[in-house]
Image: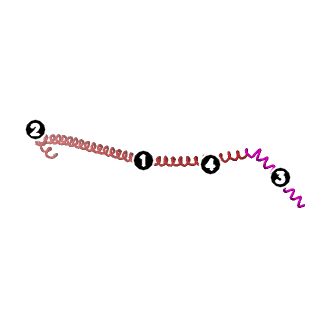
Amino acid sequence: MEDLKLELIIAAMINFAILFFVFKHFLGKKLSVAIEERRKHLKASAEAEDIAKSKLEEAEAQVKTILDEARANASKIEKTADELSKQNTAKTLEKASKEAEYILESARSQIEKDKLDMVNSMRSKVLDLSLKLSSKLFSKETANKDFLEKELDVLTK
């Protein structure tokens, strides 16, 4: 039995050696070339992945830079818009103030004109009334007219 086991072990070793040499002779070179190509392909893939990662990092940095610039520009635009708004508000207020001043000045001059018209109208009415009264009371119209005009001038001034 021990011989049988030893013979089986030797036969298995011989079979293994035959298979190994057949495999090495027919498939060994092709398999080693395929393995080497696979290693090269994996190495190239790893290098391509590294390049892609570096390009991605560069792109992310560019995106960050562009976003920062866009934010800065937006901030500048916002500040400019605020300044323009303030300037427009100031101009509008100044214009409204000038218009109000013009309206007030026009109203004052119109009031002054109306006042002068009323004074002149009242003066002529008082003079006419006084002349009528004095003509009824006195006989000399011209002397009374001169006197009344002088008195009205003194009173109105």
Whole-percent x, y for residue 126 in the image: 18, 42
Give residue 76's position: percent from left, percent from top. Answer: 42, 47
In which quarter of the view is residue 103 placed? top left
Tell me the quarter of the image containing the N terminus. Answer: bottom right
Residue bearing the label numbered 2: 142
Separation of marks 3 and 2 at Cα, in angstroms: 170 Å
Q: Give me the residue at 71% from left, 47% from top.
A: 32
Residue under label 1: 76
Q: Earlier in the sequence, mark 1 or mark 2?
A: 1
Find residue 130 and report its horizontal and vertical position in percent.
15, 42
Q: Is the Cβ of the residue at disc 4 closer than 8 Å to that at disc 1?
A: no
Local packing at callout 1 (Cα closer than 10 Å; few below 14, some 14-19, many 20+) is few
Left or right of 89? Residue 154 is left
Cα gap from disc 4 to disc 1, whole angstroms: 45 Å
Residue 3 painted magenta: yes
Q: Amino acid at mark 1?
A: Lys
> How far across and how far down the image is residue 78, in percent?
43, 47
